[in-house]
Amino acid sequence: MSSPSLSPTGQIVECCLKLDKAAQALYLFFSDNLPEQKELFCHFSAEEATHIVLWEKLMVLAQAGDLPELFENPEKIIRDLAQILTQAQELAGQYLERPTVENAFLLSCRMEFNLLHPALAELLLFANTVSKDLTLVNLYDRHLEEFINAFREWASNDRSLQLLGETLDTLWKQNRQLARLGTTDELTGVLNRRGFFNTVKPLAALAERSGEHVGIIMVDVDNFKEINDAQGHPKGDQALRFLSQTLQDQVRLSDVVGRYGGEEFILFFPSVSPGALLAIAEKIRSTVENESKQEIPVTISLGVDESVPKGDAMKSIFDMIVRADKRLYQAKHLGKNRVVADI
């Protein structure tokens, strides 16, 4: 059972933690009881330990109340994961009485299959955007690839078992794609509005507790309707993709880039020196103007705001967005292709 004192997303993280601990215990058991496969199952156990560290980090955020609500129907997901854990424990009870190599691989495959709930993919995607640890994005990919390769080698003479391994691989890739579609803008590849705010919430809470200076830059393409009308929507889409890539190239991995809507983008800086954001925004503006000349000439207007979140961290962020957006439209009023940091 999950802890009712946690938020729904926190309870889902807790369930994932319990599942990976069950998988780690299973692999440790096999490494102790199957001498010829000891090294392999020790390796899988060590990888599960890495996964457990990830869930424990998310649990810290959950216990502090800093996890956003990522799921539309969390109660069903909690029930699903609780049922999966019960099934895993029941299966272990059946198989562990006879720790043969065949039972070890079949039970491990069932365990890995259970761990491929779509919620896990979405949580990993969220964890990656928050931590900016590039190893996270491939964490489960690598683990599953190694597991499936070992499973295929053991089941090399049984096509039906090979298909089971291939199904695991396909399911995980589909789950990752679905998770990405829920938080990522399909055209530009940056976070959509939902993904942006899910990512910013814990970062804002951390900044509020540490007294960190944060920043917001609102960005809007100048004369975007004219680009679409004169050159067609494909050229407009190309301009948006160019801008989103340029924004990502011009900021740090720790900064957050999102498509706010239409031709408007938003940047969040979780740690920035007071007064530094104006120069950053100006560099972005000039880079877009200069580097777009060879393809589709594009200019942008930008509004800037920075402060230290206080009290309700997300209310502080929303207030910053309102101020930055007003400055963006002031930049438009003053002639476009400029930055306004104060009105």
Image (tube, grey):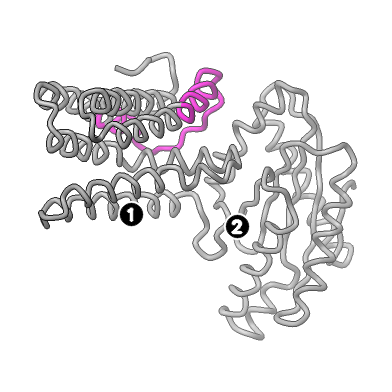
Above or below for 294 versus 307 = below
| Residue 63 position within the rendered picture, expressed as x and y whole percent measured from the top left | 51, 18
User: Does 56 appear in magenta?
Assistant: yes
Query: Which of the two labelled residues, at mark 1 and mark 2, occupies the earlier sequence position?
Result: 1
Identify the residue at image location x=44%, y=22%. 7
Q: Is residue 172 left or right of residue 226?
A: left
What's drawn in magenta, residue-wise? 53-80
| Residue 157 position within the rendered picture, expressed as x and y whole percent measured from the top left | 11, 55
User: Does 317 appear in magenta?
Assistant: no
Identify the residue at image location x=79%, y=57%. 302
For label 2, the SS is strand
In depth, the one of 257 and 321 nearer the eye is 257
Gap between marks 1 and 2 measured at Cα: 26 Å
In depth, the one of 85 and 234 nearer the eye is 85
| Residue 26 position within the rendered picture, expressed as x and y whole percent measured from the top left | 26, 26
Find residue 309 and report its image quarter: top right
Amino acid type at circle 2 is: Gly
Q: Main secondary structure of the magenta part?
A: helix
In depth, the one of 100 and 141 nearer the eye is 100
Residue named by callout 1: 174
Residue named by callout 2: 261
Q: Residues within 10 Å of mark 2 (few under 14, many from 20)?
A: few
